[in-house]
């Protein structure tokens, strides 16, 4: 039995025992079905390993400055404080007719900018023959939301979840990471 299933089984037993109260085992049966569904869905209760995504050899940069020509931004309340933060993903690359001229390796940075323009760098790496994408976690208004970063390299695919709690207060965790066969993709003729 894998660790995830063992933990899920222990949680299921605890919920069933806790629910078998004055209403008898019938109420426990309803709750145990819900827990069984959670176990079947593969929900992982183990915390993800943390990771440092900022290469200290890369000085912080601002989108549009000194060669950081490719950038995308979004405004979102990441920390749930009721004010919008600006999330920026940027790459150091030349642009020709509005399109990036990707090289064999790019420097990438992701930062969060507060309303007072204070920036917190959460990602700074050079990716050789790779790409970085940024997505925002869906969630209800007013609730904290995480950034999801996806690194796609010829020999590795990694997904990181970044939780931003305020200026200079953030953490990054590995959501998924796999080594890949670097000889190429089967779905397309070109590497990313």
Image (cartoon, grey):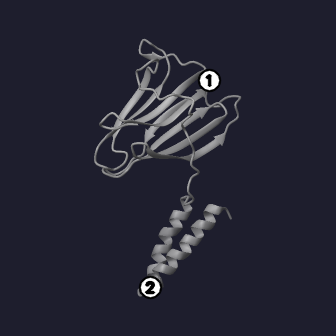
Instruction: Please say if the residues under marks 2 and 1 sit with CB atoms less than 8 Å apart.
Output: no
Quarter of the rendering occupied by the N terminus: bottom right
Which residue is nearer to you in this view: 178 or 50? 50
Q: Position of residue 99 (x, y in %)?
A: 45, 17
Residue 113: quarter of image: top left
Q: Position of residue 131 (x, y in %)?
A: 55, 29
Depth check, mark 2 against mark 1: the one in front is 2
CA distance separating discs 2 and 1 = 60 Å
Category of crowding for the residue at label 2, using alpha-carbon neighbours closer than 10 angstroms: few (below 14), some (14–19), many (at least 20): few
Category of crowding for the residue at label 1, using alpha-carbon neighbours closer than 10 angstroms: few (below 14), some (14–19), many (at least 20): few
The residue singled out by tag 1 in the image is 190
Which residue is nearer to you in this view: 169 or 132? 169
Q: Can residue 130 be seen from the camera position used here?
A: no
Q: Position of residue 90 (x, y in %)?
A: 45, 27
Q: Can residue 68 be seen from the camera position used here?
A: yes
At mark 1, the secondary structure is: loop
Taking 125 as reference, is 98 above or below it?
A: above
The residue singled out by tag 2 in the image is 21
Residue 177: quarter of image: top right
Residue 5: quarter of image: bottom right
| Total residue callouts | 2
Q: Position of residue 181 (x, y in %)?
A: 70, 34
């Amino acid at each position: 039995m894998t660790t995830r299933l063992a933990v899920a089984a222990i949680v299921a037993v605890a919920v069933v025992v806790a629910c078998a109260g004055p209403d008898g085992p019938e109420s426990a049966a309803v709750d145990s079905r819900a827990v069984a569904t959670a176990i079947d869905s593969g929900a992982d209760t183990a915390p993800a390993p943390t990771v440092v995504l900022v290469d200290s050899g890369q000085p912080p940069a601002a989108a549009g400055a000194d060669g950081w020509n490719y950038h995308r931004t979004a405004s979102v309340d990441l920390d749930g404080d009721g004010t919008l933060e600006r999330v920026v993903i940027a790459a150091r690359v030349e642009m020709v007719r509005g399109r990036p001229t990707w090289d064999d390796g790019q420097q990438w940075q992701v930062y969060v900018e507060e309303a007072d323009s204070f920036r917190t760098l959460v990602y700074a790496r050079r990716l050789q023959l790779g790409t970085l994408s940024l997505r925002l976690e869906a969630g209800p208004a007013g609730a904290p939301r995480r950034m999801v970063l996806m690194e796609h390299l010829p020999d590795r695919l990694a997904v990181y979840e970044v939780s931003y709690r305020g200026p200079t207060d953030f953490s990054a965790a590995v959501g998924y990471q796999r080594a890949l066969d670097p000889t190429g993709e089967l779905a397309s003729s070109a590497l990313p």
